[in-house]
């Protein structure tokens, strides 16, 4: 007579491991605390100075310094940094702002939105993050990039192994849209992308329609109350962007978009800051030094004058 005890024991251990893993995998829903704070504290009786952008804006613009500079300048504005890290693309920024639209409908006179813009973000898309917002899910559907639901996703809420496979650390890293349905394991997209977040935006660089659509929607909503400034980056990143066509294609797009929508685009904003190459972190070119954050906050407030 066969002894099935080892088989049953193995199955039992796998079931226990599955339940334990499920308890450790983070909730795949995303939170946006800066938007939650904005919705909670924005005063419609005062004008707003709102900074949007990717992690270069999120890490470089200190909200406390922004408000301190507003007070020092004698301006009545409330300052908010609504930039999003991890690939804060135009489509994601638009979806998050649209989700807070009841507040933005009260957009006070004299308010200004400063978009700290990185060209390489036009070549990113964040599927899972966009799915958190109704307008984001609609953008995905309209552009034909809604990935088919796999059997793993159907069991992610009850199985630890399935939830781990679906965890956003694996699924939601910003990817070139041309590869979003393939989940390619080729070295360029995995090795280089994880080595530097700047490399991914350079691969097969193009203006993705989903992000261009979002930029047009932002222009239609805010008009001349929206101002776009280029995000400052280090010398090496500038050279890489120029070599890969990111600057040529991205700047041409921005100029045309600004002209068509009568919106000011300041491509020379980084030169005005005159930051040292030491200002930037090696990966992603985030501004890290406090003295440079002071310079950036003061320069953004100066755009109101």
Image (tube, helix red, strand yellow):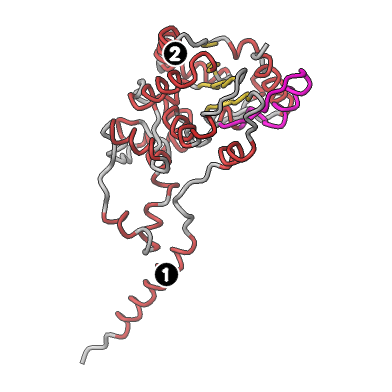
Disc 1: which residue: 17
Quadrant in the rendering for residue 94: top left
The residue closer to the viewer here, 45 or 151, is: 45
| Dot placed on the residue nearer the N-terminal end, 2 or 1 | 1
Left-right relation of 7 to 99: left
Q: Position of residue 298 (x, y in %)?
A: 71, 19
Q: Is residue 200 above or below residue 173?
A: above
Left-right relation of 86 to 304: left
* Residue extent of the magenta highlight: 59-82
Left-right relation of 121 to 50: left
Disc 2 to disc 1, C-alpha distance: 51 Å
State yes or no: residue 42 in magenta: no
Q: How many C-alpha atoms fall within 10 Å of the one at disc 1: few (<14), some, or many (≥20)?
A: some
Q: Is residue 27 above or below residue 232?
A: below
For the C terminus, the quadrant is top right
Q: Position of residue 61 (x, y in %)?
A: 64, 27
Q: Is residue 142 above or below residue 153?
A: above
Residue at the image position 70 percent from the left and 28 percent from the top: 289
The answer to whether marks 2 and 1 mark residues whose Cβ atoms lie closer than 8 Å is no
Quadrant in the rendering for residue 227: top right
The residue closer to the viewer here, 8 or 150, is: 150
Q: Position of residue 33 (x, y in %)?
A: 58, 42
Residue at the image position 65 percent from the left and 32 percent from the top: 43
Residue at the image position 68 percent from the left and 18 percent from the top: 301
The residue closer to the viewer here, 11 or 162, is: 162
Q: Position of residue 119 (x, y in %)?
A: 46, 20
Which of labels 2 and 1 is toward the front? 2
Which structural element holds mark 2? helix
Disc 2: which residue: 254
Which structural element holds mark 1? helix
């Amino acid at each position: 007579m066969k002894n099935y005890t080892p088989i049953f024991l193995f199955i039992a251990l796998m079931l226990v491991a599955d339940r334990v893993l499920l308890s450790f995998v983070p909730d795949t829903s995303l939170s946006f605390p800066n938007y939650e704070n904005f919705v909670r504290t924005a005063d419609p009786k005062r004008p707003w100075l709102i900074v949007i952008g990717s992690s270069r804006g999120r890490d470089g613009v200190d909200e406390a310094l922004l408000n301190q500079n507003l007070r020092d300048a004698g301006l009545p504005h409330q300052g908010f940094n609504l930039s999003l890290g991890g690939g804060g693309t135009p489509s994601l920024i638009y979806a998050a702002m649209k989700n807070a639209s009841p507040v933005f409908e009260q957009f006070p006179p004299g308010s200004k939105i400063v978009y700290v813009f990185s060209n390489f973000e036009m070549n990113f898309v964040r599927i899972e993050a966009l799915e958190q917002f109704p307008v984001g899910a609609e953008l995905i559907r309209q552009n034909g990039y809604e990935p088919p639901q796999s059997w793993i996703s159907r069991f992610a809420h009850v199985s630890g192994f399935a939830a781990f496979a679906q965890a956003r650390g694996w699924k939601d890293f910003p990817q070139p849209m041309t590869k979003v349905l393939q989940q390619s394991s080729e070295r360029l997209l995995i090795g280089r992308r994880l080595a530097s977040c700047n490399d991914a935006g350079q691969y097969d660089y193009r203006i993705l329609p989903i992000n261009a659509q979002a930029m047009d929607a932002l222009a239609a909503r805010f008009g001349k109350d929206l101002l776009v400034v280029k995000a400052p980056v280090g010398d090496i990143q500038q050279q890489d962007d120029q070599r890969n066509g990111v600057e040529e294609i991205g700047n041409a797009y921005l100029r045309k978009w600004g002209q068509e929508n009568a919106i000011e685009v300041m491509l020379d904003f980084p030169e005005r800051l005159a930051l040292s190459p030491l200002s930037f972190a090696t990966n992603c070119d985030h501004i890290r030094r406090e003295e440079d954050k002071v310079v950036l906050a003061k320069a953004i407030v100066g755009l109101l004058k």
